[in-house]
């Protein structure tokens, strides 16, 4: 949940985790594609990125700096007020991956029903 106001374009949070290759993925539900064969693996427990959830109508977007450095942030794309859930579209990716999909239950009127990258 947001603890303060964020305006579109504001930095919201930085993801933790280490950069890994596809063959190092243990659980595809806990990685973020950040480049060609580059993924951000799970962070230590308690990482702020774990507090952000999926929405098909998100209030933030993923911004990837250098894929080798693992600099991955969320930037507000809508006004966020204290108490709002921080959301991004899990389907965001730089490289399509037909091997992963999950059912969506975000509840948005824009819900696609399935999240795919």
Image (cartoon, rainbow, N blue to C red):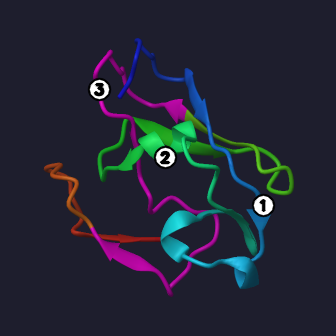
Q: Marks 2 and 1: CB-CB under 8 Å?
A: no
75 versus 24 height, above or below: above
Q: Main secondary structure of the magenta part?
A: loop
Residue at point 67%, 62% (across, down): 41
Q: Residues within 10 Å of mark 2 (few under 14, many from 20)?
A: some
The single residue placed furthest to the right in the displayed view is 68
* Nearest the eye: 66 or 3: 3
State how far apart marks 2 and 1 are (Cα). 16 Å
Lower sequence index among marks 3 and 2: 2
Pointer 2 residue:
50
State how far apart marks 1 and 3 are (Cα). 29 Å
Residues in magenta, as a range? 75-103
Q: Residues within 10 Å of mark 1 (few under 14, many from 20)?
A: many
Lower sequence index among marks 1 and 3: 1
* Nearest the eye: 80 or 1: 1
Mark closer to the observer (2, 1)? 2
Q: Position of residue 70 (x, y in %)?
A: 77, 51
Element marked by disc 2: helix
Residue at point 50%, 87% (across, down): 99
Quadrant where the image shows the N terminus: top left
Q: Quadrant of residue 60?
A: top left
Pointer 1 residue:
19
Pointer 3 residue:
84
Q: Position of residue 36 (x, y in %)?
A: 75, 72
């Amino acid at each position: 949940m947001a603890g303060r106001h964020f305006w579109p374009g504001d930095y919201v949070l930085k993801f933790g985790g280490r950069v890994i290759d596809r063959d190092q993925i243990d659980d595809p539900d806990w990685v973020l594609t950040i480049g060609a064969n580059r993924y951000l693996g799970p962070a230590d427990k308690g990482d702020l990125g774990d507090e952000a959830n999926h929405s098909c109508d998100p209030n933030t977007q993923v911004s990837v700096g250098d894929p080798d450095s693992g600099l991955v942030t969320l930037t507000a794309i809508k006004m966020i007020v204290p108490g709002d859930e921080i959301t991004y579209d899990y389907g965001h990716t730089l490289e399509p991956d037909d091997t992963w999909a999950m059912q969506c239950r975000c509840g948005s009127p824009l819900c696609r029903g399935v999240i795919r990258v």
